[in-house]
Amino acid sequence: MAKIDWNETVFCAIDTETTGVDPEGGDRIIEVAVVPIFQGKLILEKAYVTLINPGEGIQIPANTEKIHGISNRSIKNAPSMEDVFPTIQRYMRELVPVFHNGKFDLMFLDYAAKDIGEFPVDPYYIDTQDMSKEIFGTAKTLEWLAKYFSITDKINHRALDDAIVTAQVFIKLSGMIGFENINEFVKKWNGAPV
């Protein structure tokens, strides 16, 4: 990947909500959001968010619904991953994705690709968890960082809200690290063992 120039690169914060935490055990993505970032500003009018119907027989457990508030009824008529995946791929190809704990979201996206017969995503990306570890000596949660930077006191566990918080945290961390040093945090996703 070519060297990133903070003033010329469009980043995008990505967050997913899922039916649980185990894609190997059958959990799947039920919501995704992408928030573009350019020159330290969120481009909310270009944000993308959608619920996703995870497919026949995949249910949202009651304890998971309590976390993010997404019900089985609310995803019943949502688009399928087959409908949504090309848009996610395009964002990840054309922009530099930013995640908090990217391994989680990227692993779920790999399983989604396998389910629909697509090649897995393989982006160069930045993880705000890695940035927080560099600055604070240990990886911090998104909620901790949001409170530290006075962005919000509570993480809603909805894809758009969390992607917006991730974007804001990314901007703050980048300023602390130095915008010219952002390339030190770019890494390549080589896929989950699906």
Image (cartoon, rainbow, N blue to C red):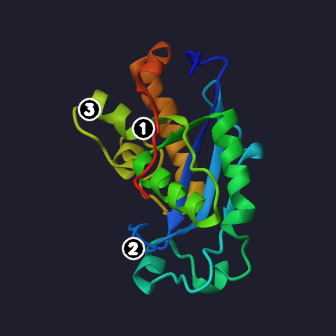
Task: Quadrant for the C terminus, please.
Answer: bottom left
Left or right, 35 with reference to 18: right
Q: State how many labels appear.
A: 3
Q: Amino acid at mark 3?
A: Phe
Depth check, mark 1 against mark 3: the one in front is 1
Depth check, mark 1 against mark 2: the one in front is 2
Q: Amino acid at mark 2?
A: Gly
- Disc on the earlier residue, 1 or 3: 1
- State the residue position of label 2: 25
- Disc on the earlier residue, 2 or 3: 2
Mark 1 in CB contact with mark 3 (< 8 angstroms): no
Residue 76 is situated, as x and y percent measured from the top left of the image, at 68, 83
- State the residue position of label 1: 128
Residue 188 is situated, as x and y percent measured from the top left of the image, at 47, 33
Mark 2 in CB contact with mark 3 (< 8 angstroms): no
Secondary structure beneath disc 1?
Answer: helix
Along the viewing direction, whichever of 90 and 74 lies nearer the viewer:
90
Residue 68 is situated, as x and y percent measured from the top left of the image, at 50, 71
Residue 84 is situated, as x and y percent measured from the top left of the image, at 71, 60
- State the residue position of label 3: 136
Left or right, 185 with reference to 86: left
Secondary structure beneath disc 3?
Answer: helix
Mark 1 in CB contact with mark 2 (< 8 angstroms): no
- Where 95 falls versus 152 (above or below)? above
Q: Residue at x 39, y 73 (%)?
A: 25
The image's mark for residue 167 is none
- Disc on the earlier residue, 1 or 2: 2
Along the viewing direction, whichever of 75 and 146 lies nearer the viewer:
75
Number of residues whose C-alpha sits closer than 10 Å to that of mark 2, classed few (under 14), some (14–19) or many (20 or more):
few
Q: Amino acid at mark 1?
A: Thr
Mark pair 2, 3: CA separation:
34 Å
